[in-house]
Image (cartoon, grey):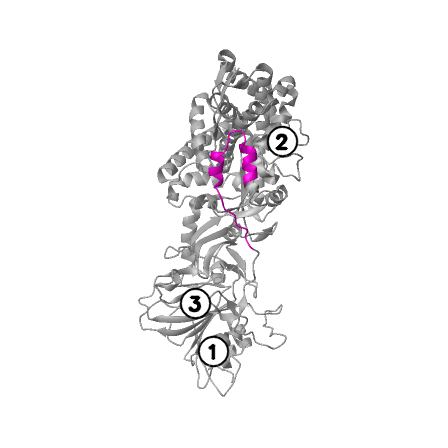
């Protein structure tokens, strides 16, 4: 028997006419259709064609007054619509208050908006609910937000901005639900082709879900989440279904997000089934199964995913700090590679990459993002993010945190400020700085290299490049070190440390803002004046220029200091190396590249996956972070003969000390110039240079990502 409506508000076309039976149709507001049972009409009378067509039009179908579908009759009826999604617990999920289940779905609390199948990476088409029990006044209305209606109210500018935003969702997996994944907040309906929202609200209740937004400055996350909630809960886009016992409701999981108002008591029981997307033709018409068979109760199993190879052992940072000062570079590389070519390291929450070919593929792929803000935020769960809003505002605009067109424009602006011609013009100034810094060693025959030379040279060169006044340089150096320590993970993330970092960021930001205004009036031959030329060409904001300047100051100062120390240690620690440079100073430039290959200051490069992919047999999910070990990549036997041997005459040295690809270090040329000038002078003037008798250099493994030296006493 086929159900037929009375002619209600012009909706008689909704169901095929059959005079033997009648149903009453009630339009729901702002969308949806309630079908009230007519005499003799059963749920089995509604054909799949009828349901699919009604669902495309109404998004929600609520059946009321029909005979209940008991036991397996409910999932069997659902199989008419398509294949059922088979969860770990089966195809039917019973939703009722249950204190034993450590998940907010089984509490009386409000359930934020979300879509089903997100953490399974297999979203179903329909969600079918069957209400077995609902006491009067129990509350707990199920809420549905039509995201196609939401997007119809959003400006084209906002849509374009949202296309660049991905969200990472993190929660502990409890039974069938949870884990972590990333998705773009905009999607497409697989049947209708409509633009949809794929967004889930954060959960603060039992088994909380954290939401991190890529492509948006961290300090703007809260405002975005609040603004999105305001859009989703508007009366003209949201329907709230008040349940009665016996109600059967079908919702379009692709177009809608759903949640629940809080319950007033436990007296409600609903069974839920997920139905996968059926087959449709190009016009959106349902295509019945070719063999005419209805899917069985066993349901659709989400595809088996390749495994994540997981390894564990002594923490990497702990290993670094306990390593022998001399054997560290080789020992560290061998320890990391001993676990495999690629693996997941749960202690740090990231994948480890040790092959150069894999690293090159990752660094060149648009399936990975350089925006690592969410990884940093995840490491500071106890910090009030409002305290570091200025810090993240500056960092989020840096080219090192950008991708695609935005990255290219910001990088080009930096190249205007640090081009080869400008740097070459600074060579005499760099040489004068080197001469001045070596004077104490020349006079006394002793020097604490880290403090007296390695830290001062790059900060002085950068200050000269930026035109920073002499009186302000020490404060700049202090603030840059604070920012680097926070960014590099070498601090305990507390609110006090966050305040200190934010204050340091403000000092640098406002100083550069003032200097920019001065350069607009009186340009010079320096970094910021060059960037102002780029600003006119690429329509960049002052804040973007300031962020690139801050990046150069912070990254260029600390990493160059560390690399200078690592290089000198290898020169003096390895027998015969310094003597060969004394005999032939022309080898210094090539030796610097071998030193960077052998012991890079940046111990890990890292990226965040935009989507699930398989690399060298390892499953990397959207939102996963990958750490590429510089020490391992630089010892890849596919690239180097005798990779564990330090050879200052090695030819065609290729290393990852400055990165690879689009994000290759913009300051590499400046760094090379400083090191070559310094060490050529030292090899020429101090042929008997050595570590001071009775002392041993002290390494400074202050974070997982960076390594240098804390102290290195020299004598001649």
Q: CA distance from mark 1 to mark 2?
A: 72 Å
Which residue, given by chain and number where applicable, does mark 2 sit on? 645
Residue placed under numbered mark 3 in the picture: 30
Residue 628: percent from the left, percent from the top? Answer: 56, 41
Mark 2 lies on a secondary structure that is loop
**Could you tell me which residue is drawn at 40 percent across and 73 percent down?**
131
Q: Are marks 2 and 3 in contact (CB under 8 Å)?
A: no
**Residue 544 at what x, y percent from top left?**
50, 38
Disc 1 versus disc 3: distance between alpha carbons? 31 Å
Instruction: Check the image and report above or below for 232 versus 560.
Output: below
Q: Residue furthest bottom?
A: 20
Which residue shows up at 41% across the image and 75% down it?
Answer: 247
Depth check, mark 2 against mark 3: the one in front is 2
- The number of discs equals 3
Give percent across and percent down for residue 450: 48, 24
- Which residue is disc 1 drawn over? 73
Q: CA distance from mark 2 to mark 3?
A: 72 Å
Q: Earlier in the sequence, mark 1 or mark 3?
A: 3
Q: Which residues are magenta?
A: 307-335
Q: Earlier in the sequence, mark 1 or mark 2?
A: 1
Pick the front one: 359 or 715:
715
Q: Secondary structure at mark 1?
A: helix
Q: Residue furthest right?
A: 651
């Amino acid at each position: 028997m086929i159900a037929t409506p009375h002619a209600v508000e012009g909706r008689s076309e909704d169901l095929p006419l059959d005079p033997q039976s009648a149903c009453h149709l009630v339009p729901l507001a702002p969308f949806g259709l309630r079908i009230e049972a007519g005499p003799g009409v059963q749920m089995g009378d509604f054909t799949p064609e009828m349901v699919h067509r009604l669902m495309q039009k109404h998004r929600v179908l609520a059946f009321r007054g029909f005979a209940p579908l008991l036991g397996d009759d409910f999932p069997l009826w659902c199989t008419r619509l398509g294949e059922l999604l088979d969860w770990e617990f089966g195809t039917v999920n019973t939703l009722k208050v249950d204190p034993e289940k450590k998940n907010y779905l089984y509490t009386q609390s409000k359930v934020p908006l979300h879509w089903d199948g997100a953490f399974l990476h297999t979203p179903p088409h329909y969600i079918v609910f069957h209400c077995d029990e609902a006491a009067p006044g129990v509350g707990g209305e199920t809420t549905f937000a039509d995201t196609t209606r939401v997007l119809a109210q959003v400006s084209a500018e906002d849509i374009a901005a949202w296309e660049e935003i991905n969200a990472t969702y993190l929660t502990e997996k409890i039974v069938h639900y949870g884990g972590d994944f990333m998705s773009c907040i905009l999607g497409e309906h697989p049947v209708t082709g409509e633009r949809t929202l794929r967004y889930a609200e954060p959960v603060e209740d039992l088994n909380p879900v954290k939401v991190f937004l890529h492509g948006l400055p961290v300090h703007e996350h809260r405002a975005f989440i609040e603004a999105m909630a305001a859009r989703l809960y508007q009366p003209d886009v949201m329907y709230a279904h008040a349940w009665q016992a016996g109600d059967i409701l079908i919702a379009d999981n692709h177009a809608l997000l759903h949640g629940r108002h809080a319950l007033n008591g436990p007296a409600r029981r609903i069974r839920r089934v997920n139905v996968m997307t059926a087959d449709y033709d190009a016009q959106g018409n349902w295509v019945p199964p070719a063999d005419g068979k209805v899917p069985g109760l066993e349901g659709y199993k989400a595809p088996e995913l390749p495994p994540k190879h997981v390894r564990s052992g002594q923490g990497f940072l702990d290993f670094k700090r306990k390593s022998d000062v001399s054997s560290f570079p080789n020992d560290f590389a061998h320890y990391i590679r001993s676990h495999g070519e690629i693996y997941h390291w749960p202690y740090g929450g990231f994948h480890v990459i040790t092959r150069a070919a894999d690293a090159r593929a990752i660094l060149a792929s648009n399936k990975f993002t350089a925006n690592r803000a969410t990884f940093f935020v995840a490491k500071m769960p106890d910090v009030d993010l409002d305290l570091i809003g200025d810090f993240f505002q500056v960092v989020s605009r840096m080219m090192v945190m950008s991708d695609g067109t935005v990255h290219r424009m910001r990088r080009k602006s930096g190249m205007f400020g640090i081009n080869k011609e400008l740097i070459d013009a600074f060579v005499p100034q760099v040489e004068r700085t080197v001469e001045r810094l070596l004077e104490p060693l020349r006079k006394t025959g002793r020097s604490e290299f880290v403090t007296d030379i390695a830290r001062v040279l790059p900060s002085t060169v950068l200050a000269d490049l930026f035109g920073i006044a002499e009186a302000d340089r020490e404060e700049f150096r202090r603030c840059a070190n604070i920012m680097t320590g926070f960014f590099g993970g070498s601090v305990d993330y507390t609110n006090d440390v966050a305040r200190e970092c934010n204050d340091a960021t403000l000092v640098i930001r406002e100083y550069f803002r003032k200097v920019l205004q001065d350069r607009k009036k009186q340009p010079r031959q320096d970094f910021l004046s060059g960037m102002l030329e780029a600003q006119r060409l690429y329509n960049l904001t002052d804040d973007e220029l300031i962020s690139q300047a801050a990046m150069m100051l912070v990254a260029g100062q600390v990493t160059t200091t560390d690399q200078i120390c690592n290089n000198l240690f290898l020169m003096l620690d390895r027998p015969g190396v310094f003597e060969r440079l004394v005999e032939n100073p022309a080898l210094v430039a090539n030796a610097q590249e071998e030193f960077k290959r052998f012991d890079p200051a940046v111990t890990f490069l890292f990226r965040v996956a935009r989507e699930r992919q398989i690399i060298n047999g390892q499953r990397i999910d959207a939102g996963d972070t990958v750490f590429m070990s510089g020490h391992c990549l630089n010892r890849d036997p596919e690239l180097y003969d005798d990779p564990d041997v330090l050879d200052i005459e090695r030819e065609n040295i290729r290393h990852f000390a400055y990165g690879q690809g689009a994000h290759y270090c913009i300051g590499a040329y400046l760094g090379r110039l400083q090191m070559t000038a310094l060490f050529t002078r030292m090899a020429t003037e101090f042929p008997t240079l050595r570590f001071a008798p009775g002392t041993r250099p002290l390494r400074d493994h202050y974070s997982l990502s960076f390594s240098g030296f804390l102290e290195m006493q020299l004598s001649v």
